[in-house]
Image (cartoon, helix red, strand yellow):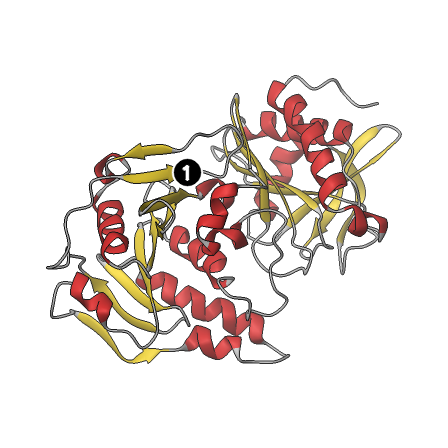
Amino acid sequence: MLSEPTYLAARMVAPQLEAHFMERHAEDLAAGVFLPPAALVEVLIDVAFWASLRQEEGHPPKISLALLPPGPVAQPLLLGKPRRLTAYNLLKLAPAVEQPGIHLGVWHDADGLYVWGTATSLPPLCLVLEVVEPGLLVAKHSRAEGFGKFINLAILRGDQLQLVDVEHTMADDYPALRPFLPGNGHPTDPNEPDSVLVELAAAMRAHGRGGLVLMVPPHSTAWQASIVQPITYPIEPPYTGIAQAQQQDAGHWQDDYRRAIGIVGGFTAVDGATVITRDYHMLAFGVKVTRAATSVPVEQLMLTEPVIGSETQYLHPAQNGGTRHLAAAQFVHDQHDALALVASQDGFFTVFAWSAARQMVHAHRIDVLLL
């Protein structure tokens, strides 16, 4: 029998996750995608939360749990004796599955949930619960097309619950935010506009040093009016690895795609900004932003977050973050056709764009979508 969960946030979020799958993926569920029942999701989250607060030989567990039977999994690793889903068993198994892309498979029988083994590939729209750190869990699902970063649905930080706003209306203000939101498919090839941003954002956060990317129109030099000259690290000719991967057909394009994005993401760790075009040509790194001679200092921006219940804030750029955030806001304020991505060392991630409707810089806080 299922044990009685004691983690209140699990009880609050489980029905909403079930409703998300039922409402957003009805056709896919009819085609064989597994609907995660609220009762099972609640127990899954409850056990994972209490496991996250424990340690094995001084290390907290980092686990990814996939809720599905082993049948639809390609080349699963099956345990000869499945283990009941308990905090103790998760703690013992955690060291074996810490590498990215390995999930503990969890399913249920008459006696409750059990761990049946591991999976390295998941079917479309599979519910995944990731234990990121003690007390921090992320509920997400694999993309319908099976490629790309999983889509976050809910963030649980101790007693705090953040539900991703699927219908985030501010996304219409700039289309670059749309690929990050649930319900927006990731392409089976990388040719969909702005799909690269999801993977690039993850690469920028991965090195943990913080970073700033300035995305400018191709074949334009206007952006250089907002850059300290001369540029210390120009790329000549521009690096076109991402664009070349986009042009590939079948074969190994996914590996080349991730490798090229990883290269660009690595350069964002260098102090200064990395400049790329909208067609993903890398022009420079280590760039210093300055106010254009014909511009004025940015005095106010609007800040939104795709979380249900959050409110739009209007504040001075200095209240939104450090020097990277201020530089990004000033650059977009001067270059309305540009986009700025800022990864903070503390894990926050913000997309800056010019809002033509509101005639001001719009900062989208999207770190809840990237955990």
Q: Is residue 161 above or below residue 317?
A: above
Question: Would residue 254 be found to the left or right of residue 17 on screen?
Answer: left
Amino acid at dot 1 = Thr
Residue at the extreme bottom of the image, as rendered: 237
For this rendering, which residue is in front, 143 or 182?
A: 182
From the top left corner, tell me how far across and down residue 357 is, in percent: 38, 48
From the top left corner, tell me how far across and down residue 301 is, in percent: 29, 41
- Disc 1 residue crowd, few under 14, some 14–19, many 20+, Cα 10 Å: some
Residue drawn at (76%, 38%) of the image:
36
From the top left corner, tell me how far across and down residue 123 is, in percent: 74, 55
Q: Is residue 248 above or below residue 111?
A: below
* Residue 86 appears in the figure: no
Residue drawn at (31%, 53%) of the image:
211
Residue drawn at (52%, 75%) of the image:
246
Name the quadrant of the N terminus.
top right
For this rendering, which residue is in front, 241 or 47?
A: 241
Residue at the extreme right of the image, as rendered: 110
For this rendering, which residue is in front, 80 or 371?
A: 371
* Residue 208 appears in the figure: yes
Question: Would residue 132 be found to the left or right of residue 250 on screen?
Answer: left
Residue drawn at (15%, 56%) of the image:
290
Q: Look at mark 1 in the image and give the residue it sits on.
A: 304
Question: Would residue 94 be found to the left or right of residue 358 on screen?
Answer: right
For this rendering, which residue is in front, 330 or 271?
A: 330
Query: Which secondary structure lies at badge 1?
Result: strand
From the top left corner, tell me how far across and down residue 168 is, in percent: 53, 41
Tally the numbered discs.
Answer: 1
